[in-house]
């Protein structure tokens, strides 16, 4: 389950109120990603690339890894499914708790974040410390940052020392729409 979260795997003064949240949060709902996962025992990070799409109305996240392996995950409030070769979803987990946290991360909804995380705002980043014991057992914190007008970064810090950095960018016009 932890590996599914990691594959998924955006400011102002300290303790800002939700109405002070910047407009860039949750603005990027479809695009590309580059993920670097650094395991404590490896010298170089494992790098994957692909496409993502978040549909706030359907409360669904599509996470399509294209390299080094082709894999498409469908995440909704009920759990996580993987699309098979025929395009049919195969349930990987029906743990709605985990998938709901992923959807909350992509929502940009600060009020929803505050239900699950303690938030600390600095510059163009928000650090999210899990409140729920099951998340605290896996992650020490999440960090969402605005890198530029077009790029955002999600950083995940596992309690075992593993770190992941996911850079999100807008969908190039040459790529097909994931949400149809």
Image: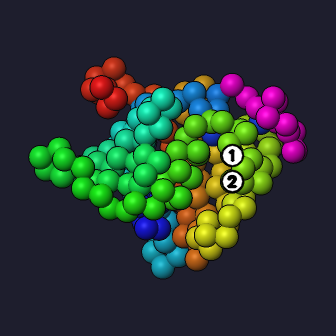
What residue lies at 64% left-to-right and 45% top-to-bottom?
144
What residue lies at 77% left-to-right and 54% top-to-bottom?
118
Q: Position of residue 167 (x, y in %)?
A: 51, 43
| Quarter the N terminus occupies | bottom left
- Give the side of residue 166 with respect to residue 23, left or right: left
Q: Which residues are magenta?
A: 12-23
| Quarter the C terminus occupies | top left
Picture quadrant where residue 105 is located: top right
- Mark 1 touches mark 2? (CB < 8 Å): yes
For residue 133, above or below residue 166: below
Q: Is residue 108 among the parts visible in the rendering?
A: yes
Secondary structure beneath dot 2 equals helix
Q: Position of residue 153 (x, y in %)?
A: 57, 43
In the rendered image, residue 11 lying in the magenta stretch gets the answer no
Q: Residue furthest left?
A: 86
Report, in whole angstroms, how far the alpha carbon at label 1 lies from the one at label 2.
5 Å
- Per the picture, the main secondary structure of the magenta-coloured stretch is loop
Secondary structure beneath dot 1 equals helix
User: Residue 113 shows which numbered tag?
Assistant: 1
Q: Is residue 45 among the parts visible in the rendering?
A: no
Q: Position of residue 3 (x, y in %)?
A: 42, 66
| Callout 2 crowding tier (Cα within 10 Å): few <14, some 14–19, many ≥20 | some
Colour scheme of the picture: rainbow
Which residue carries the number 2 mark?
116
């Amino acid at each position: 389950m932890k590996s599914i979260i990691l594959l998924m795997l955006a400011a102002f003064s300290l303790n800002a109120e939700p109405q002070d949240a910047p407009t860039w949060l949750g603005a990027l709902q479809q695009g590309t990603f580059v993920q670097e996962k650094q395991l404590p025992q490896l010298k170089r990070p494992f790098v994957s690339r692909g496409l993502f799409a978040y549909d706030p109305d359907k409360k669904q996240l599509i996470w399509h890894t294209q390299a080094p392996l082709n894999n498409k995950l469908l995440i909704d409030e009920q759990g996580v499914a993987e699309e098979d070769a025929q395009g049919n979803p195969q349930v990987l987990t029906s743990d709605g708790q985990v998938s709901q946290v992923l959807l909350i991360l992509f929502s940009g909804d600060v009020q929803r974040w505050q239900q699950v995380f303690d938030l600390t705002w600095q510059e163009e980043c928000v650090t999210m410390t899990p409140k729920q014991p099951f998340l605290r057992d896996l992650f020490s914190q999440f960090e969402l940052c605005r890198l530029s007008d077009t790029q955002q970064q999600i950083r995940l810090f596992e309690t075992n020392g593993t770190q992941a950095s996911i850079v999100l960018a807008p969908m190039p016009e040459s790529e097909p729409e994931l949400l149809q």
